[in-house]
Amino acid sequence: MSSHELISAIPFAILGLGALGVLLLGVLPGKNNQQLPYMGSIVVLLATMLSVASLFGHSANIENFVVIDHFTLVAFELFAAGGLATILLAKNYPALNKHVAEEFYALILIAVLGTFILASASNLLAAFLGMETIAIPMFALIAWNPQRKGAIEGGLKYAVTATVAAAFFMFGIALIYFGAGTIVISEIPKALTSANAMPMVALIGFMLLFVGICFELALAPFHSWLADTLQASPAPVMAFIGSIAKIAMLTFVIHFVIQIEPIWDQISFVLWGFVLFSIVFGNLLAFRQTNIKRILAYSSVAHFGYALMALTSVIPNSSASLSEAVHATAYYGLSYAVMNLVAFAVIAMLNKHNPTGELKGYRGLGRRYPLAGVAMAIAVLSLAGVPPTAGFFAKFFLFSSVLGNGYLGMVVLAALASAVSVFYYLRILLAFFAKEEYYHHNQSADVESVEFGSTAVISVSAFATIALGIFAQAVLTYMF
Amino acid sequence: MLSLLIFLPMVAALLIGSSCRKLPFIARSMTLTTLIIESMLVAWIFITHQVHGFSMTESLNWIPDFGIKYLVSMDGISLSLIGLTCTLFIVAMLVAWHQVNRWQAFGPLMLLTLSGIMGAFLALDLMLFYVFWELMLIPIYFMLSFWGGKDTKQAALKFVLVTITGSLLMLVSLVALYIINGNNTGVWTFDYFYLASHPITGELAIPVVCGFLIAFLIKIPGFPFHFWAPDTYREGAPAVSLLLSGVMANVGAYGILRFCLAIFPEAMHQMMYIGMALGAIGSLYAALLAFRQKDLRNVIAYSSISHMNLVVLAIFAWQLQALNGAVIQLIAHGLSVAGLFAVVRMLQARGFSGKFDEMGGLYKVLPGIGVFLLFIVAASVGIPGLGNFAGEILLLAGSFSVSPLWTSLAAFSIVLGVVYFLRAYGLAFLGPISDDNEQRKLIDLTAREKLTASIIVIGLFWVGLEPNYLLQLMMSSTKTLASIHSGSYSLIEGVINVIS
């Protein structure tokens, strides 16, 4: 490993060592201080963001294991910011109060490290490693404070799903290695043309790999775990799973597709079924939910269906079509992460008024907390794809990419499905701004203040949701 | 200047929304002030005669990778409709004056709607148009949901779902148009001028234009996409229904006029008779339904649908007089429907929900409102000298030269209009008065209501007696549009001379 590569690995090192350091802060002698690991983990994440920022312009391939390029660096910044948001939200989150200690922060840092490895993987084993580095801390984080109702159940569901996904993924890797003789992603296409290759075996391997990925992304028909898990987990953790962990997987898929470009058209058909099912079932299932967490979970199923539409429809041997699809998907992922972060942060902030997340519990809260109300409105409108928010441009770029590849029927279906989705998104807004029924009984509740962490996360990400839309050009240029 | 028209209300809305949380009355006066400033800006454009063809163009690159520009410009058609928009917003404000309790929310929403509508009338980049088109929908949805009758949430939801379905189909068409044009010409753009000078032909043109037409017809509300309208108009607060029927409907008609005709001349020509038939059937059908209603608000809703479908007929007829008539009719219809909803609000303020069986003989106690309503009814049924007559006569004469059959059919809706309006007027204001209503101390027009009424009366007289002013204003635009049809399906160069 050359010194140049060593420099590129600094963000990983800071995160990993930082996580251990934060963990060690807990065994400091003396009074157990919650503030220290909190500040420590924030410092670690900020240092990571800074070191990532200093790497822009670099690109490196470290030991055929991870690849650092401009796009992954942008993704790193997003993930680190997401981790930061999670920590800020968790600080004053009532259901976790008194239970958030250095382990919690360290686990989040480790999960962020996992997203880094996954997003930059150039080797299938690295991807597997990253995937598991995200998943294992999540088992604990979902079931954090196990006395909560459903905590263990949610954690267990996630654990089982993640393990099954890992098994598929691992088996896929084994078959690909068997068929192609390499697990370095960019070498697979060439290896498959050699005399000893067994393309059929490799193809089955790819299918299993994608089943694993679809489990992780919660694409239909492997979506059933997401709603239960999100409902069971504390809102900050939910924000991490819902917006950052899934986007890390999406980034890996994008990276994978870029590296495997020559044979992508022979594999992409595998995804069609997932895409179609996700768009249709995600939207239909969200229709009947009365819990905001479940609505967002099912809408997320549909959103990942949209997001993968562009990559699936790429025209064979057309690099223009591929690059357009990659742009569209990456922008979709970014805007999805940001707008969902807004929604989850609002849920986390209002948790003390409505711990279950049932829609009717939110009646009038949008009026009482105008910041939360307006931010939720922005998030929901963006999810529904109303201009000029990020969600709209994400849809627009996606539709033009897919339509450019000649799939009119798919686009019309997606458009109709998102028209359906407006219905359940508007229900959220109606609940938030409806007249409050019991408001007058506890006037005193009016004066309570709102914590710094959630306010900061909500306002920054809500602002970003609109800015990403209005300055879409700058974002596109910056991302690639 | 044009950007100022768009963003002034938006900025004002943000300021009012963030600063007047506990001060509804200050929010109300600030909203009115903003509207008046906006109207004065528009009036200034009218007075200085800056608009010939497309003028005052502003152009900026927005998302160059996708050829999206910030391109706004104004011609006579948009200027006339913007003038109407400002007037109606002030009327709506006066109508909602006492009815709305939370002005700190209602005022900003109204201003956001205004800025969306301004943007939609001014945008000449199709993507920008789409952005504003959706932008105006969201605030009005909130206004519908939280202020209005008891079923207003249902109605608002129906409205927004139908509209967004249309909009998304339009988005798909928009992207398809972009790709087809890009493949044909190699230029990837949403620029109206470029698209209009390279019109889309071939078999894909019809499905693509249909996406646009559905979205626009839903907004108008044109037959057979009008089904959302009666409920929404009835349940919404009168001020909101007024904006929906008087202003937002115009954006739909404007969209067909501006974009469908110029960009898809061949497809629109092929669909000419279908469109005229839809318009004629729609106006007749709505007129027949209006005859059977038991609620004044429903009569207004169906009459509005009926009149707007005449506009659809005229736009599809695509002939100079018809297009001129269509725009005049849009303005006259906007004013008269605003008057009708203002009357509804006046009656609601006096305890009548709008059902005919509560009313009857009200002329005895409310002569002022009675005379005002009679005036608007007269205008709506097309008495010469008032706005609607000028519009209807032009659009019917123009359409008749294209399709005598459908135009004659549509003309019956005007005859029916006389019948259903007079029936409604009779049920509400003539005949025996119930003792209850006679005993109640009803107050006739207040000063604010007189102001509302006089704005509308003056407007209708002005459009009716001096339509030439507006016709001169938009002549160059409608002439070019009409010439696309008679010519060889391509925009002659005259339209594209952008005077900046």
Image (cartoon, helix red, strand yellow):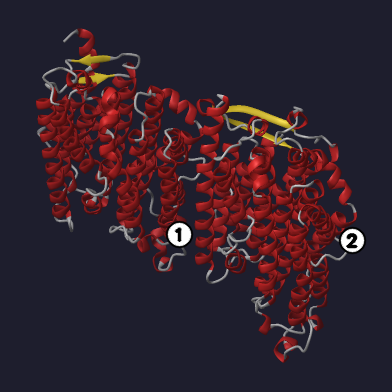
The picture places residue B449, in percent across and down from the top left corner, at 77, 66
Which residue is at the front of the view, A166 or B339?
A166
Depth check: A304 or A366 in front?
A304
Contact, mark 1 vs mark 2 (Cβ under 8 Å): no
Residue carrying label 2: B385
The amino acid type of the residue labelled 1 equals Leu
Q: In the shown orientation, is residue A130 left or right of residue B132?
A: left
Based on the displayed image, in which of its 4 quarters is residue A241 positioned?
top left
Whether residue B134 is visible here, answered yes or no, is no
Q: For this view, does B163 lie left or right of residue B309?
A: left
Q: Decide which of A208, A61 is in the foreground and name it.
A: A208
Q: Which chain carries label 2?
A: B
Q: Mark 1 points at which residue?
A: A430
Categorize mark 1 by other alpha carbons within 10 Å: few (<14), some (14-19), many (20+): many
Measured Cα–Cα span from mark 1 to mark 2:
46 Å
Parent chain of label 1: A
Kindly state the secondary structure of the residue where label 2 is placed. Answer: loop
